[in-house]
Image (cartoon, helix red, strand yellow):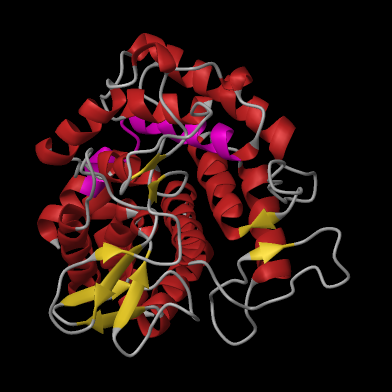
């Protein structure tokens, strides 16, 4: 109990007002953001607390539950937060640890057909719990976050050569000669929160080595990270993982947003991204680009990509799309998260944790 209270004291001391809010900045921004949250909740959150991915057969997954919990906390919506957390724990949590099965299939006989977790979903849930626990003075939420970070540390964080890395899930990503990583699963604000609540030294190594990988693992004309990365266990350099398509796409698009959120989007990567963002002219930003051939998607990026570009300083603020332009869960999630990042959500705690870890 003493250690837990000490963590709470550190969290409160380091966080100050920034950690506790996740809120947009000024009054007008808060009002606009609340309207966006109302739209999101109405279209993508069921009454029993399930975030519905309407672009993927109306399934639910831990990524969506984590986003929903983050948004509910940001807009001080305790009722929705509690319903989201209850559904997640009742439906997806493992019996033997604090991790969660990664998806729920509403139309299948077995709604949760596999126990495999998704590390990004668990990290999003843990961060939402951390922030909500601090904001509302709920030690039960903070304790739940601590349990997730401890389980991830024990089961997901591994050593690969000189790197302390974050596996994308429990199974299927660690091989005798290599590990396969997903750059967009490095949700830097959550990793920094893990350093506050769990093993600071280990989580800060994950952050530092993750940043190294994100710089070394960029490819193609645009010098961008792929959706999936392969890292040799001994020597060598990171490369594009097979058999996934060698694309900067729907996964990797989140890398700059998570870096921006944590105050870590530095000049070299921002320069590459600006070149990419500004290269398409009348054709518009594509949904993906092949990092080996340069081929672009035959269709344009959804509104959430454009919102992300504004939040990361890659596009003019006037290009920020209306929430109502989003017709699917994923684009809407990127749009709302980008709005909050643009308004400086939790920037203070992330900078302080990074410098003090």
* Location of residue 259 by image quarter: top left
Measured from the top left, where is residue 312 in percent x and y? 29, 30
Identify the residue at image location x=20%, y=40%.
265
Residue 210 visible somewhere in the drawing: yes
Asked whether the viewer can see residue 20, the reply is: no
Extreme residue toward the front, this view: 293
Residue at (51% x, 25% y) in the render: 303
Q: Please, what is the dominant secondary structure of the magenta stretch? A: helix
Is 44 on the left-hand or right-hand side of 73? Answer: right
For residue 175, above or below residue 55: below
Query: Residue, x 80% and y 68% (percent of image)?
Result: 111
Would you say 158 lies left or right of 50 here? left
Q: Please state the horizontal and vertical placement of residue 161, each as a whole percent of the image.
A: 17, 82
User: Percent position (x, y) of residue 272?
Assistant: 19, 35
Q: Quadrant of residue 96?
A: bottom right
Magenta residues, as a range? 330-350
Q: Residue furthest bottom?
A: 176
Residue toward you, 152 or 165: 165
Q: Position of residue 355 (x, y in %)?
A: 11, 54
Give whichever of 286, 261 is nearer the camera.
286
Quadrant containing the N terminus is: bottom left
């Amino acid at each position: 109990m003493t250690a837990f209270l000490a963590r709470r004291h550190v969290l409160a001391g380091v966080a100050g007002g920034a950690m506790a809010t996740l809120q947009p900045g000024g009054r007008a921004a808060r009002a606009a953001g609340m309207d966006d949250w109302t739209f999101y909740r109405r279209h993508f959150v069921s009454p029993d607390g399930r975030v519905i991915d309407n672009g993927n057969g109306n399934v639910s997954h831990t990524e969506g539950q984590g986003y929903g919990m983050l948004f509910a906390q940001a807009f001080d919506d305790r009722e929705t937060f509690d319903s989201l957390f209850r559904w997640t724990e009742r439906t997806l949590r493992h019996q033997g640890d604090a991790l969660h099965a990664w998806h729920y299939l509403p139309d299948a006989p077995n709604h949760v057909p596999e126990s495999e977790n998704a590390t990004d979903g668990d990290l999003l849930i843990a961060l939402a719990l951390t922030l909500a626990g601090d904001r509302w003075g709920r030690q039960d939420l903070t304790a739940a976050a601590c349990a997730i970070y401890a389980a991830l540390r024990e089961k997901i964080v591994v050593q690969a050569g000189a790197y302390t890395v974050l596996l994308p899930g429990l199974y299927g990503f660690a091989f005798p000669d290599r590990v396969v990583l997903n750059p967009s699963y490095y949700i830097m604000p959550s990793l920094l929160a893990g350093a506050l609540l769990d093993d600071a030294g280990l989580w800060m190594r994950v952050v530092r080595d993750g940043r190294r990988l994100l710089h070394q693992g960029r490819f193609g004309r645009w010098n961008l990270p792929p959706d999936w990365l392969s890292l040799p266990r001994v020597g060598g350099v990171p490369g594009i993982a097979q058999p996934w398509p060698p694309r900067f796409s729907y996964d990797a698009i989140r890398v700059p947003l998570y870096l921006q959120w944590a105050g870590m989007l530095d000049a070299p990567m921002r320069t590459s991204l600006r070149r990419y963002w500004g290269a398409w002219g009348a054709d518009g930003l594509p949904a993906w680009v092949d990092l080996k051939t340069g081929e672009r998607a035959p269709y344009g990026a959804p509104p959430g990509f454009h919102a992300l570009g504004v939040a990361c300083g890659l596009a003019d603020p006037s290009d920020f799309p209306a929430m109502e332009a989003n017709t699917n869960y994923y684009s809407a999630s990127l749009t709302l998260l980008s709005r909050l990042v643009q308004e400086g959500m939790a920037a203070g705690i992330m900078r302080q944790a990074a410098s003090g870890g």
